[in-house]
Image (cartoon, grey):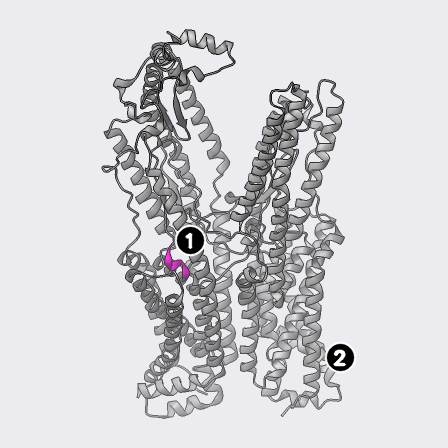
Amino acid sequence: MFSNIVLREIHQHILSFRLHLTMILILLLFGLGSVAFIKGHTADRQSYEQVYSTNLEKERSWAEKYLSNYMIRVRSLMLAPRSDAFITDAKEKMMPNQFWYSGFCVFGFEVPNWASNDLMESFAELNWVYIVSIIIGFTVLLFSYDLVSGDKENGTLALTVSYPVSRGMLLTGKYISVITVAMLVLLPGIVLSLIILLLSGAVVFDGILLAEIAGFLAGTALFVACMAALGLLSSIITTRSNVSLLVCLCIWLGSVVVVPNSALFFTDKLFPIKSSQSVKERINQAQQAVNAKHKAIYDAVKGSNVTAEEHFRMYEKQNMEWFQAEKTIKDSWNNSLFYQFSGSRRLAAISPVSLFEQLSEALVGGGLVRLRKAWSDMSLYQSQLLEWFKGVDAKDPESMHIYDPSNTFGMTHKIVDFAIVPQFQERRASFAERLDGARLSLALLIIYTVIAFSLSFVLFVRYDVR
Amino acid sequence: MILNIAFKEFYNNLLTARFTIGFIMCLFLIPFSLVVNLKDYREQLKGYEIERVKTEKSYQVRVYSALRPEIVRPPEPLSIFSKGISGNAANKFKIQLDSRESTADGYETGRENPLLMSFFSMDFCTILVFILSLFAMLFTYDACSGERESGTLKLVFANPVHRWKVLIGKLIGVCLTLLPVIIFCFLLSALIVLLAPQVSFSAGEWLRVALLIPVSIIFFGLFILIGLLFSCCFRASSVCILLCLFVWVISIFIIPNMANSLAKSLVAAPDNEDIVTVNLQLNREMGKKIAEHSQSIRKQVGSDFFYWSGNGGEDGYTELAGASRNLMDLNRLYFEFVEPLRIENAEKKGVGEKEFMDKMEAQMKLANRLALLSPTDVFRQVSNTLCRTDDDTRRLLYYESLMRYRDVFIAYLKAKNVFSSYEYFTRQPPETFMSYDEIVRVRSGGQFNSAAEFIKWQKEHGGDRSPLNKVPIPGTAITDYPPLELTDMPIFECKSPSTLGVLRQSMGKIAGVICVELVLFFLTFVCFVRYDVR
């Protein structure tokens, strides 16, 4: 009986005008989106590789002069464009993806200004998550706004309820049919997109990518379930279908436009951070204090016989403290940046659309998850590089083994083959890390769905069909 | 009769749930969007004031080689209404001889936290177009089909009234409903701006805000007509609302993004790296020429590199006082040759930079042209033009004002013949120049008779310069001289488009929209007259 209900509903939906309209739109969007992605990705990849090889050449020339010269130079590192950005780009182009570091210190990150065309306003890319959150989310509401109120208006609800079927089963049947139809609408688009991507050869399909696609589909199903539950609820609360439509539109407008775009309004008040100006001043003060302290030390030993090595040791101490002063302040500032950012994202969690975006972002290991991982990996790499360098330095009898972050006097001046110098390799986030990032949004999406559906269940059981 | 129908429609609309909900949404969202942008604007204004004070110092110089005017652009007040690309554009410039591109670090227009760059914020015009276009279609989708379904259309047509009168009556009724909402939105925003501290608009700015009102009415007319057309074409109101909503979603969320994506993939983005390489090559070639010349003049004049006080910096800044006559001559000959060369080099580098910008512009123009398919995006473009936050304003500032000023400034320097004069790097009158020997003799009070003697002594005493402090020579410190009198210097004038200018620029788009409206009206009219009321 249950399958009967579901099949009848699906049958009705499939013949409806809205489904055909959505289907055409979805196919068009996925097709165009994939073509745009391939073009954009190839260009991004090219410019990334050019920057990467120029940087590598520069670093090689530093290392070929002598190794400690390579260690003290400040260089930048850029994260490669993700090839699975067709699922979601997580707005990575607008996020920092360039790190500044030397062998002794990781300085900070920044948004590369050349990544976007300044003459254009920033916009969201047409990736899978965008299409699903805008079009599919919208369609699901369109499918579900008149599930109950529409049936009531044309009088079929009274007839349906008069069958020997429990109301709960009827509602669940309607609910499941909407989810199924939405996924059915989506599938041709995804298949088309995958075919285009496969034919272009711009993306390598490996196990991880397939798992990501599966994860995306599961996330989409959850998102669709959530939106359908909201639509169902609105269709039960309101007695007339056009009011229900209005309520659905408000829900949609709120979750697509208002909530994600208004997080900034509250950010400053709820998650205040210090201004970058004041941080700069604090760093300056701390560094001046270090300089003053060491000037006193120099003055104390002035005139007495101090060997060059002792001088170098003093410099090292000063420079080390100077760097450390900047690093402690900068690190806490960077942490506050991350804190503010994740706080603002949590604010947007009222909207299922934002939740879905955050969920898929974490599942593909992009955006915040990626930045955080790369940032901590960078520090790890820097300390490993320093350890490795100290090992090389220890073998050099001429070196004084003084590790000054801005002078090479006391370090080895030997030339080492650049090929054996450890290079930073970005590691993709592991499954556990991705799941960890997705936990909150996953839980909230499930909670929203369950609440909305159980509310509609209770209300429908008591529904007045007249 | 038409008015009767219009008022009936108006009252009907006024009492519906959609009117209440839409009105409440406007009431909430519009102050919301303005407050965020007002805060941004106030912060920019604060930054601007600080930078402006700094730029005034760029005219307080003692020598011409230090004279590199700095220009800071005030934030655009109407960016509160429509942000456009005002947040991306550079706002501080420094005129330099060896580069046409002269962006300097100005005040912050972005966000303090770089991570937050991935959040979009909405401005007044975006909210307005979102809500009111939806509103316009929600009021019209059932104007005809809905009445047919409820059966009232038959009764209306049974009256001795022409159908066109009914149609126009309905149209006026919807306009009457929407007009107060639009006016209300603008009045509310004007009130918020008036009450905001530190923000004051000039008459011209208020005029441009006022201009936004008729423009938005024209655009909402378009959506009203689209809704009406669907309503007259189809028999079921559920199909009409569906089509209306799809048109709305596509024009707001799909076409602009698609246009941007397509433009980015159709017009290849220029590579910044290429320019860097070319410029490096050009600089290297120039460096070679300069090195050759320096050697030859050094041979010619001789070199002893003695100066009492001096300073230097970027873009040729050199300031000397109390230098030996040789060094002064050397510098004069050096700058006479080098400065015109650097100006020429800047022109060469400018070619590649211009190409780069042209490509960027081509990309942006294509995106804008593709986005013309979406009425809401046309409104965005027009409102950006009216608020002077679009690309044309940037061009006008950058090419018309800034580049022209650079040319005028260089012409001014050339006319004064400063590159071949001593005044370029020193304020000491040439008649007071002394040779190294003389300086050493006078300063040491006769302890040394020639520079050679002093140098020898200095070598033995670890570089000690103290014997030269014995007898001071007046006018040999750079700080002895007052800043240059620059009364005849050309003053930078920022050309920003006038109200008439922005109106003229957006006239084409507005006229296009009106034409489309006429066509839509005609179609609606035909459909309505033929409408089957059964």
Residue B11 appears in the rendering: yes
Task: Check the picture and name the quadrant holding the N terminus of chain B.
Answer: bottom left
Q: Which residue is mark 2?
A: A2
In the rendered structure, which amino acid carries the disc numbered 1?
A: Lys
Q: Position of residue B374 (x, y in %)?
A: 44, 62
Q: Determine whether the residue tagged by mark 1 lies in a helix, strand or loop.
A: helix
In the rendered structure, which amino acid carries the disc numbered 2?
A: Phe
Q: Which residues are magenta?
A: B76-80
Q: Residues within 10 Å of mark 2 (few under 14, many from 20)?
A: few
Asked if badge 1 and badge 2 are on a common chain, one would say: no
Q: Nearer the viewer, residue B227 or B15?
A: B15
Q: Which residue is mark 1?
A: B46
Q: Disc 1 versus disc 2: distance between alpha carbons?
A: 66 Å
Judge left or right: residue B240 versus residue B379. Answer: right
Judge left or right: residue A54 versus residue A381. Answer: left
Magenta stretch, main secondary structure, is helix
Q: Determine whether the residue tagged by mark 2 lies in a helix, strand or loop.
A: helix
Mark 1 vs mark 2, foreground winner is 1
Can you say whether B485 is above or below A210 in the image? above
Residue A111 appears in the rendering: no
User: Which quadrant would residue B386 be assigned to in this image?
Assistant: bottom left
